[in-house]
Amino acid sequence: MDNGNGGDHRPGRVLVVGGTHGNERNGLWLLDQWRQHPGQLHRHGLALELVVGNPVAAQANRRYVDRDLNRSFRAELLSDPDNQELEVLRARQLLARHGPAGNKPCLVAIDLHSTTAAMGNSLVLYNRRPASLALAAVLQRRLGLPIYLHESDSCQSGYLGACWPCALVIEVGPVAQGLVNGRICQQSQIAVETALDALAQAREGPFALGSALLVHGHLRSMDLPRHGDGSPAGLVHPSLQDRDWRPLGAGDPLFLAGDGTTTAFSPENGDGSGTLWPVFINEAAYGEKGIALSLTRREMVPVAAGWAPSLTELARRLERDPP
Ligand SMILES: [Zn+2]
């Protein structure tokens, strides 16, 4: 696994993945359309690999079969010869085919996801690799996309995007699992084309990225209140539902119990400081993970001098779309 921008300086393509979660149908729909009607995706001259992340789960319209593919790119799983779970096999296969050192190497990974939470069109980053930050900065400047930086949670790791030198998750919602929604598809496509445009532009040379990137850094996740037997003792409070990316302060309602009792947010739920910003509120897929919402801190990350050159170095190794 390549841990940075250096690699072996081989050329490579842009990997566009849909259906990493098999019941997120919008990315799958787009991949199908782009394969059948290549002219419907503006590639900006770049060669792409359009890949279904988890074809078996997609066929079954399930998030996954044995384990979440987007938590399976962990070194200890990938290197364990006894582990033959479907998603671990698939993660190894994707890396062998399209990893930075794969047979048909890809240098950039764009992973299309959808969420049942009211996140709108947003980006998820798993680390602070300069090329990823640069690409995210372009999408934030051009499309105003909020960024969830999920880099520090020992309970949650093994993301596909963490394995490529430059990676973006495009996360769009709200949309039900299993449902294709034209607006979600449009928003996803705009983000993909803007990213490809930025990569094509970066080939020409480093360009201005602004002075700072606004990120929402993951702090921690919160579960619903639960009874002793593990069953939910409350639900996400109606006044919190759909308020992703909105400030949450002391006294704001979090959960509503069956007896009408409200659990309010207190600074101790977070980092002891003031306002936090919740994301993935009541995401359907996270119930099994014991996550009712995740709390983030807002942070202005100054654009470093190395980001744009790093993106340019990578973009100049990208293969051109065959005419
Ligand atoms: Zn997903």
Image (tube, rainbow, N blue to C red):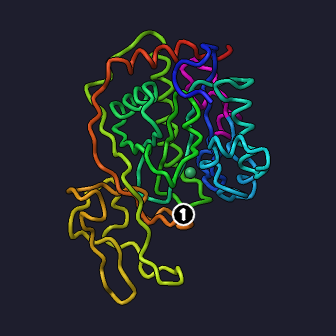
Residue 282, image x and y in percent?
A: 45, 65
What kind of element bears circle 1? helix
Residue occupying the point 59% across, 24% down: 107
Residue nearer the viewer, 155 or 17: 155
- Under mark 1, the amino acid is Lys
Q: Which residues are magenta?
A: 31-50
The residue sitting at 58% across, 60% down in the picture is: 177
Is residue 48 in the magenta section?
Answer: yes
Instruction: Specify whether residue 145 is painted magenta.
Output: no
- Dot 1 surroundings within 10 Å: few (below 14), some, or many (20 or more)? few
| Relative to 267, 72 lies left or right | right
Above/below status of 313 relative to 235: above
- Identify the residue under disc 1: 289
Is the residue 233 above or below the residue 25 in the image? below
- Residue 35 visible? The answer is yes
- The quarter holding residue 317 reads top right
Give whichever of 35, 260 is nearer the camera. Answer: 260
